[in-house]
Structure formats: C-alpha cells, structure tokens
Image: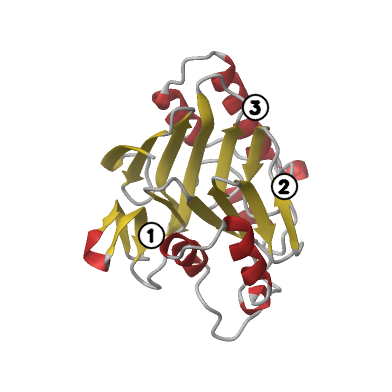
C-alpha cells in the first residue's frame, strides 16, 4: 500500500475509519479481496499478491488487522529479501498479540527492504518501521501513512488527512466521500516534492493521492470501518490499469 489515512477513536460511531490506496505495477498479478478459504485461512479477509504470496492489508474475523507500506529509499539494497507482504499475512495467520508480534519482527526487520507496519488488536493500535526502529502505540486522532514515516507531511498526505477530518466531522460517514478522497489526482508543486532518491519527474508522478503512470499506479482503493459495536465494513474498489474506471467492487460485513 502506498497511502493510508485513518481516524482512530475520533468519531462518535466508529473506532476506525480508514481509507487506503494500493499503488503497484499494473503487471503484478493480484487477487481481489476475499476470505481465504482455499488457503486454509477462512477467517482472513484480504487481497493477495499472486507473485510473492502475501498481502498488503487484511483483517481477521476476530478483529485483528494489519497493513504494510513500503518505505521509499532506493539506496536500501537487499539481496533476495523476503516479501514485505508476509509481515501482514503471518500476523493474521498466527495467534500472537500485536505487541509480541512486533517485538518478534524487530529481531529480523533488517532482512527486509524498508517498510511501515500497522497492527491492530484488542490491546491497541501500533506502528513500526524498520527504518526508525521504533514501535509506537497510536493515539486517538487523524493519522496518515505513505512511503515515509507515520504522519510525515508529504503534500498528498496533508491533503488526504485534511479531507478525512472534514468527512468525519460531519458525523454520518459517507463511503462515497471517502472514495472521492482517494481519487484525488492533484500533484504537488515542484518546490514541495519530497526528496526520496528517485528522479524528480517520478517524484512528481507519484505525488498525488491517486496515481496514474504508464506502468504503475493505483490498483485498488479500500475502506475499512469498525464501529463501536464491533461491526466491520470492508469495501474494495479495483480499477482498470492506468485509469480510475472501476473494474470490480466488493463489500464484506461481519461482526467481531
């Protein structure tokens, strides 16, 4: 995933209102979100990276969920590193508490390319990056994560967080408004582009919330809402490569 914004315990009805875009090469094979009954993991709801076998975001029927984003730094070179998608999948398939799992991840985090990991269970909501090497418990409020650290003020993240705050302030959550937030194609001006080690024209191309390039861009948008009664509403909207035309939409609801 490349952009995640969320309101955590800052809405009268929902403990979590999360909106996220997965950006990836169009040619990378992917399975849309579904319960993984064919994988002997019927309680896990997630999409699947068919190339490496992991997932970028998923939720278990017990309410535990996880998501990962890449940390953008081309100078980080690893020889045959493990897939970062396994960090999410292994958590959802296991039975470890979030904090215990993160402590375990820290012992082998250097094997991976740069990543950010979000974990949620009944004990709390946590973030860890193998670049900062810090495990932190997330406080109530509006937060965002892209390809840097949590709440780094990249232009697209500031815009998305501001729009999410406006949406949640209205009280009644409209999912279409969240999807519109994720479809913003406004690019940052040159003087506000982050410097991550990639050429400036690429920084410009990926500086929008919704990305379209010739070979890489936003593949799907996902909403995850968890209300205070434990009802989960998970919606994934997939797009035709290089466009914002919807190719598939899936919705799942269940009680934790």
Name the residue rendered at 41%, 26% in the picture: 175
Colour setup of the view: secondary structure
Q: Position of residue 177 (x, y in %)?
A: 45, 24
Q: Which of the two labelled residues, at mark 2 and mark 3, occupies the earlier sequence position? A: 3
Q: As displayed, is residue 155 above or below residue 103?
A: above
Q: Which residue is mark 1?
A: 26
Left or right of 218? Residue 69 is right
| SS for dot 2 | loop
Q: Which of the two labelled residues, at mark 1 and mark 3, occupies the earlier sequence position? A: 1
**Quadrant location of residue 157?**
top right
Give the residue furthest to the bottom. Answer: 79
Q: Which residue is mark 3?
A: 162
Q: Which mark is residue 210?
A: none
| SS for dot 3 | helix
Q: Which residue is mark 2?
A: 193
Closest to the observer, 117 or 162: 117
| SS for dot 1 | loop
Q: Position of residue 53 (x, y in %)?
A: 37, 70
- Pointer 2 local density, CA inside 10 Å: few below 14, some 14–19, many at least 20: some
């Amino acid at each position: 995933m490349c952009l995640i914004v969320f309101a955590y315990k800052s809405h009268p009805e929902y403990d979590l209102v999360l909106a996220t875009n997965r950006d990836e090469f169009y040619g990378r094979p992917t399975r849309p979100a579904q319960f993984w009954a064919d994988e002997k993991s019927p309680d896990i709801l997630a999409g699947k990276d068919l190339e490496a076998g992991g997932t970028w975001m998923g939720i278990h029927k017990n309410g535990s969920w996880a998501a990962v984003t890449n940390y953008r730094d081309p100078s980080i070179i690893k020889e045959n590193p493990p897939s970062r998608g396994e960090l999410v999948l292994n958590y959802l398939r296991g039975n470890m508490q979030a904090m215990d799992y993160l402590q375990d991840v820290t012992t082998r985090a250097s094997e991976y390319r740069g990543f950010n990991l979000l974990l949620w269970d009944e004990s709390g909501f946590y973030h860890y990056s193998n670049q900062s090497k810090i495990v932190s418990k997330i406080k109530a409020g509006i937060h965002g994560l892209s390809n840097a650290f949590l709440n780094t003020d990249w232009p697209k993240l500031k815009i998305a967080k501001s729009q999410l705050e406006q949406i949640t302030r209205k009280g009644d959550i409209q999912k279409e408004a969240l999807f519109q937030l994720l479809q913003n194609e406004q690019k940052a001006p040159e003087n506000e582009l982050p410097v991550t080690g990639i050429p400036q024209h690429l920084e410009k191309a990926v500086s929008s919330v919704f990305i379209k390039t010739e070979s890489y861009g936003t593949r799907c948008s996902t909403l995850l809402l968890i209300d205070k009664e434990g009802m989960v509403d998970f919606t994934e909207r997939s797009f035709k490569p290089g466009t914002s035309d919807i190719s598939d939409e899936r919705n799942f609801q269940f009680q934790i």
